[in-house]
Amino acid sequence: MQNTICMSGKEAAKLFYDERFFQRQHAAPRMLQKTLFGEGGVQGLDDEAHRHRKALFMSLLSDEAVVELVRLSEAYWQAAIETWQHRNRLILMTEVQTILTRTVCEWAGVPLAEDEVTQRRDQLAAMIDGAGGIGARHWHARR
């Protein structure tokens, strides 16, 4: 066991991002590296490798890209609401996962055929839900 320090606020964020005091390599538990972050993900990189990968990611988040993400999200929410009005029951968690899957795949330019929506939705949900899990839940998330 190691001591854990919790910090919040602007000054804490500045300190956390000061590379003189922190390293990312080996900071995330291997279970998260195997599921949520991926091995070699930006969360485990330091120095120039981290700056380069982060800049690549941040370049995707231009004002125009964020506007497009919001537009897609609104469109998928509206389409889902239209279909919900004609149903007696629904599972909101599953419906929201479907909306998010469709939105992010289209926004990221990942082709998603109609017959693979359910499979991708379930894979993404398992990856997020099981990232910190142990046993079967963790192994399911790694698929």
Image (spheres, grey):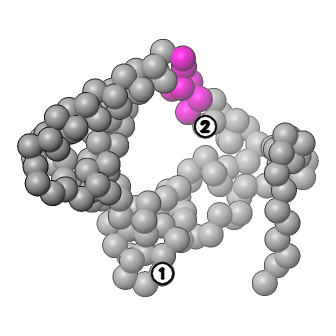
Q: Nearer the viewer, residue 64 or 56?
A: 64
Instruction: Please provide the residue range marked out in magenta.
Output: 56-63
Where 52 falls versus 84 (above or below)? above
Q: Residue at x 54, y 63 (%)?
A: 33
Q: Nearer the viewer, residue 89 or 98?
A: 89
List the residue tagged with mark 1. 134
Q: Nearer the viewer, residue 87 or 118?
A: 87
Quadrant occupied by the N terminus: bottom right
In the rendered image, residue 62 lying in the magenta stretch gets the answer: yes
Q: With 140 as the anchor, is 36 left or right in this view?
A: right
List the residue tagged with mark 2. 53
Where 71 falls versus 124 (above or below)? above
- Disc 1 marks a residue whose amino acid type is Ile
Where 90 falls versus 57 (above or below)? below
- Disc 2 marks a residue whose amino acid type is Arg
| Residue 107 percent coordinates (x, y) | 36, 29
Earlier in the chain: of badge 1 and badge 2, it is 2
Residue 109 placement: quadrant: top left
Quadrant occupied by the C terminus: bottom left
Q: Main secondary structure of the magenta part?
A: helix
| Residue 95 percent coordinates (x, y) | 26, 50
User: Callout 2: few (<14), some (14-19), or many (20+) C-alpha neighbours within 10 Å?
Assistant: some
**Discs 1, 2 touching: Cβ within 8 Å:** no
Residue 112 placement: quadrant: top left
Q: Nearer the viewer, residue 132 or 86?
A: 86
- Nearest to viewer (mark 1 / mark 2): 1
Q: Residue at x 63, y 36 (%)?
A: 54
